[in-house]
Image (tube, grey):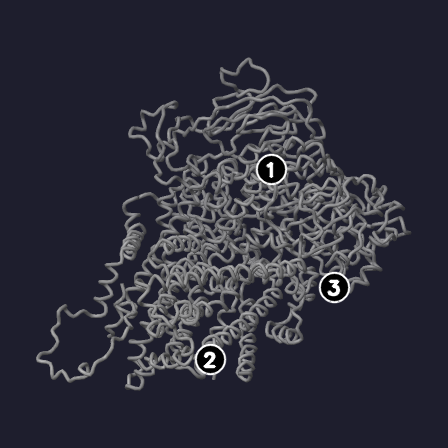
Amino acid sequence: MLGACLDLIEFDMKQSESLPTTDPSSTVPAPGDRMTRAAARQLAIYAAVVVLALVVAMFGLNYLASLTSSAAGMSREAVDVENNIITSYLREEPPQMNSMRSSDAISSMVMAHVMEGLLRYDENSELAPGVAERWEQDGRTVTFWLRDDARWSNGEPVTAHDFEFAWKNVLAPATGSQYAFLLYPILNAEAANNGEVSTDEVGVEAVDDHTLVVTLETPIAYFDRMVAYMTFMPVNQEFFEQTNGRYGADADQMIYNGPFIMTSWVHGASMQLRKNPYYWDADRIKLDGIDYAHMTSDSNTLQNLFKDGQIVIADLTSEMLEEAMFQRWPLSQFMEGTTFYAEFNHRPDRLTRNLNLRKAMLLVHDPSELVNRVIKLPGYVPAETLFPRWVQGMDGSLREEYPLPPLQRDVEKAREHLQMALDELGLEELPPLVFLSSDTPVARIQSEYYQEVFRRYLGIELLIDRQVFRQRLEKMTAGDFDLVGAGWGPDYNDPLTFADLFASWNLNNRGRYSNPELDAQVRIAQSSLDPQERTDAFGEIHRIIRDQAVIMPDYERGYVYVTDPRVKGIVRHVFGAETDFTNAWIDADAGEEQ
Amino acid sequence: MWLYTLKRLLQGVITVWFIATATFFGMHSVPGDPLSGERATNEVIRANLEARYGLDRPVTEQYFIFMGNMLRGDFGISYTQQNREVNDIIREHFPVSATLGLLAVLFAAAGGILFGALTALYRNRLPDYIIMFLVILGISVPSFVFAALGQLSLVNVNNVLGFSILPVAGWGTVGHMLLPALVLGLGTMAYMTRLMRSSMLEVMSADYIRTAKAKGLSPTRIFARHQLRNAVMPVITVLGPAIAAITTGGFVVELVFAIPGLGRYFVQAVQQLDYTVIMGTTVFYGAFLVFMVIMVDLVYSWIDPRVRLQ
Amino acid sequence: MDQHSKHPSAAVVPTLRPTDFEVLGTQSSAPVLVRPSRSYWQDAWQRLKSNKRALVSLYLVIGLILFTFVGPLVWRVDPALQDIDQISLAPGADRRALVVEPFSAWDGVTEWQQSQGQSGLRVADSPNTQSVRLKWDASLTAGGYLVYRNIYEPEGMDSLGLPLMEIENPSQAYYEDRLDLQPDVYYYSLVELNDNGQPMGDYQMVTAEVRRVITVDEVIARNLVDDPSALMPGDEVMLAWHPLGTDYLGRDMLARLMAGAQVSLFIGLLAPLLFVSFGVVYGATAGFIGGRLDQLFMRFADFVVALPFLLFMILFQVVFGIGPGESGIIPMLVALVILSWPATARLVRGQILQIREEAYVSAAKLLGASNKYLITRHMIPNTLGVILVTLTFAVPTAIFTEAFLSFIGMGVAPPTASWGSMCNEGLKTMLTHPHELIFPAAMISITVLAFNLLGDGLRDALDARMRSSE
């Protein structure tokens, strides 16, 4: 009550001069309504002010946004016919554009547009001469003769010294390059990376500006196929040193020798590539520029951007297929070249070390059912073995030259193997097995499906251990699993990149599979120079992996994608740029009917 | 007043220090290490990398090194974006999140106060029902569903019209911001509407309003001077944390609309265990949040003189 | 308390006469109670009952609880049971299926009678949901083939639809399609490729009308017929009935919604209840006592707010040792409670600070009211409205936090279902199988609606100032 009184006094003092002259209550019969109406009027004024303020605020924000813009100077159309520029996207922000330290697919893709190594991949995904005009291997010595019209984007010539500097820098311990191991076939490379010898001792030498001589540790058959990878790309020493360790961090912290140069890089938002006038083969390049205007991995967003005519290419999910067919978009398919599989843990204390248990599980596993009816993503193909379809044997596909019986579900036989396994292990019943899985949507579906398959056909209980990226790697390395969902993509264009995966010394062999027979075949494949002998070794490895049920193959990953009909010549490679625009051109008339 | 502000700021610094310490040790006790990759690295390369990032030292030593660097304003180099400084990442991406968040909060606060007051005035009548229905819709659909649906409808509208009324995704102009900010602010707007309605109802039955009416004060004056001003108090209280939550919690919207905000970097950093980025963003956001809270307290005492600042 | 409250505008004071001030004399009898005395809680209950919306919401909440706990007893379908034959089936879809022999891979040679002797692209066996078998004449000039499938009739080389498979071996003149076949009409096209993988010439097309089938083994394993011995391939059976359809692994949506309700309501109700009550106690203590303690308490709240939620979420999972096969609900709950209370605490503290300065509190203090009295009679009833609103809003927030964690792959571990994770899964097939998104989203909406209305009703019922209004 006291408070109310005080209020009253206070208000009286304030309001005394403006007391109403008429008695309001006598004229208005419903005071509640009057209040409401007055308040609503007040609110309307307030709303108008707010809207006005928002409009003003928006102008301010517009200015702010333009400072951190991704769209500045970028075309909002997928195809800019007038300027001969196309717009695309990147799945993620490239961690860096320092070719000596990069290890991811996105960097590799951009790098293939702005840089060129000794060799490159052409429009048919075949190796073609890049900076090197020709090359020759004689036992342990590989010689590359560089063309003399290759130029950096500052006009300086690209010389053999640029390669020598880059490769030695990759191996320098202070660089901390994750992909330094790719250079280990070179003489003294591993020792230099270890810090045991100086990088001067590494077997790379620029004899003159245009001749690069590489001495190998042992003769290997596939060295020329490795040098197209980004880790082997040249770096201009003079420029590198003036960047103070920020080489490749921004568009102006690099110089380029590829078909395009990067003119701007707004981190997390966009990248702008323009034609490189200094590129030696500039006539081959028909586009004047590529804008990577978006960086997102959300497939729905990408499909929406494509539908809105803002990007020239998009991968499709099964969800979008119906729409794509309805819109009569031209669809294409691309196999990424990676295999996914469930890897058993072969460590001594694990039940999955038992061969019969592994065989039983492999026998109820049906990759075709998994891919066609559960995952259902277009472009995915059931895997039969570790080696993907593209891996070549002598004349054709390795898998056709060394055929294996198809993986088919045989519950009867599987139960026999399970019984044998139980007898060998001395168990009445199998305790639950742990399946270590990643956090992706496909992994979730797959792990749930696995659970049902093994419970239904074998009565094996599977516990799903789903972990985020780093924690999963930690558990994989520690061997804290019975089965783990894994995948493998090629590092270089030779079957060995898959074949040595389950060699006992390979650190990527997370299940620690160890088999002297397989190891012996890997050694043959590594050291032999005879193609037939190597291919036979690969065939044998292929057979051992199936017979010993080392892994359960799941699928080979692929994509179904749609491209803007006006843009021709887009190529997708297993090696090099995943999406390669260097051979693309705009055909403005093609999209007319759309 | 000034002394009070200074004192609060000092306390804020101590709070931030606590946050940094807790996060640092929390982060280091999560298993996994930021240098591992899908491809296993051999010991040589690993050792080279560890030396490069100073991970070969004991955690307590790393802590003191980190604290020393932090005092100099240096958070170090990101593990995943290996050539970028954390400072650069924050400097380039925070303004994006902040701009988006600011617009979202503006939407939320303006809409929330307006709708809240309306529903209270028209209690149990048609406007109340309509707005409350929308509010329920606003809070009962997850933001990722809203974001996806919003974008999808925009594409279809653009497709039908034959030209883009608003860009589908990306960043750069106000056009890019409108839909994401609306999606981002929707939940907060609904919350504020409810809060405003509730506190407005309370204020409307308060003694001083009755007194004011009894004195024959004009309804407009009562509403503006007494009701609105008092009812807005709880809304102001949640405004501080809301600004912080919105500017930091825009991950979903940033992902769906391909916006280069700091939220994406932070979630990615946690999942990738990118130590330096986690520390940089946490300390930065912590400081930002503490600052917002102090601001709110000051504004609070300005609006409501009865809340004394000692 | 205050008789004038019913007539707030009756402020017109009549002209006073001296007789108005005469003494009335002592009253002859004590005031008679015309209505039975009711306690605060009885009164509140009465008001709640008279509020129709609140009552409806109360029934909704009871309905939800029944759905969650009694539902699984009535609808006895295993929420984890997958059915590969009924993946993503919409409610009310045609459930008839033809019984066939178990699937075995095709050698690419055998053909059914209908197509024997035909040339060009042809369907080599009865097309069904297990497989569609295509055969064509091997080309001598081609370097390979590309098989397309479409659900609309193609109009030209650019609109052949989905590229199914690139066959690089020109002598392989057959293909078996098994990719996500639905009972529908498909248009298959074949394009010959040259050695570089470029298309040459025109395309051939054939249509296939796919029928839903089920294998004999499946029919028996799932008890779809009474007499398995009489079952013959070619019979027609009805597949299991799913009132709300099935999800991406053929699991019953209704059963999964019930199972998901347990997780979502557990998180959605318990977490807010815990952190709101803690926040209330914490904030009230800080606000009521004030001074140094208040400062200390609030700085600690700031500290907690600024901790990165995701990081500590992972940390709690580690601390709790979430092993494989566990759902991870408890660490999520703990993380939510530990990291979410400061907002409530701040709000309540703000309210208490405001109320502490109210005149009636000062008056009560002057009259010698104890702290306990002040808290229970003034502080709590007056903050109840804001607290209840916070609580009802914390319910969807908690459910969404769980959903958000699912969105970034850190939610409840599979195969545990929750509405949030179901929404997230459903989002991916929003256009083709909308029921997978609509049902869980609707459940969340209903829950949120119920708790909001109930919160409103409770606020009105419990609020002391509302007692005499309406």
Residue at (29, 67) in percent of width and height: C466
Task: Give the residue number, with chain letter if any, for mark 1.
Answer: A560
For the residues marked 1 and 3, what is the alpha-carbon distance in whole angstroms?
A: 42 Å
For the residues marked 3 and 2, what is the alpha-carbon distance in whole angstroms?
A: 47 Å
- For mark 3, does the 10 Å Cα neighbourhood hold few (<14), some (14 to 19), or many (20 or more) residues? some
Number of marks in the image? Answer: 3
Task: Give the residue number, with chain letter if any, for mark 3.
Answer: A174
In the rendered view, tell whether residue C76 sits above or below residue C313. Answer: above
First-in-chain label (1 vs 3): 3
- Considering every residue shown, the one lying at the far right of the view is A208
**Of marks 3 and 2, the one in the foreground:** 2
Considering the image in quadrants, where does the N terminus of chain A appear? bottom left
- Considering every residue shown, the one lying at the far left of the view is C28
**Amino acid marked by disc 3:** Ala
**Of marks 2 and 1, the one in the foreground:** 2
Residue at (59, 18) in percent of width and height: C120
Q: Quadrant of residue A196?
A: bottom right
Chain ID of residue with mark 3: A
**Amino acid marked by disc 2:** Leu
Considering the image in quadrants, where does the C terminus of chain A appear? top right
